[in-house]
Image (spheres, grey):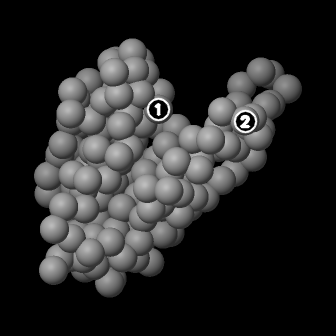
Amino acid sequence: MEKVAIFVDVQNIYYTTKQIHKCHFDYNAFWAKATSNRKVVKAIAYAIDRGDEKQKQFQNILKGIGFELKLKPFIQRRDGSAKGDWDVGITLDVMEHSKNTDAVVLASGDGDFDLLLSKIRNDFAVSVEVYGVAQLTARSLINSASKFTPIEDDLLLK
C-alpha cells in the first residue's frame, strides 16, 4: 500500500476558497480523496489560533478527521496588519517526512513552496500532489507538482 503524508496550509485554503467559491473547503472530502487506498504516515494542518469558540470547533473537526494540528498565535501588528505565516514550519515538516513516504500531498496555492516540491521530487523520488484553488494557485507551484487537483465542487461545502 502506498504511503502518503499530507500537509495543509489552512489559512491559504480558507481565504482562497472563500474568495473564489464563496464557501468553505470540505476537509472530509479532501481526506477521502487524498488517502484513498493509501496508508497515512503523517497528516498535519497548520493554522493560526485566535482562540475563539468557532475556531476551536473547527480545530476539533480537523483532529477528528485525522490531522495533527499545529497552531501559531494570531499576531496583530501596530499598523493593523496581521502575522501568521507557517511557510518555514511546513517546509521543515515536508522535508522530514518525505524520506519515509511514497507521496506528499500539499493543500496550498502558495508559490513559495515550488522549490520545496521540486527538491523533494528530485531528492526523495516521491510524487507530489497539490490541491489548490486554480485561479489563486501559483503557476510555479502547479508546475512543480506531479499532479494538481483544483479545489472545485466535490471539495466544497455548500
Q: Indicate the amino acid at tag 2.
A: Glu
Work out whether residue 54 or residue 104 is closer to the camera in this orientation and state it: 54
Q: Is residue 112 above or below residue 102?
A: above
Quadrant including the N terminus: bottom left
* Residue at image location 17% in from the left, 46% down from the top: 148
Label 1 sits on residue: 14
Local secondary structure at mark 2: helix
Left or right of 147, for residue 75:
right
Left or right of 100, for residue 33:
left
Q: Is residue 119 visible?
A: no
Work out whether residue 85 or residue 47 is closer to the camera in this orientation and state it: 47
Q: Which image quadrant for residue 103? A: bottom left
Q: Earlier in the sequence, mark 2 or mark 1?
A: 1
Q: Is residue 63 above or below residue 52?
A: below
Local secondary structure at mark 1: helix
* Residue at image location 47% in from the left, 32% down from the top: 14
* Residue at image location 79% in from the left, 31% down from the top: 76
Spot occupied by residue 3 in the image (x, y as percentages of width and height): 24, 76
Q: Is residue 10 visible?
A: yes
Left or right of 110, for residue 153:
left
* Residue at image location 65% in from the left, 37% down from the top: 55
Q: Indicate the amino acid at tag 1.
A: Tyr
Spot occupied by residue 110 in the image (x, y as percentages of width and height): 39, 41
Label 2 sits on residue: 53
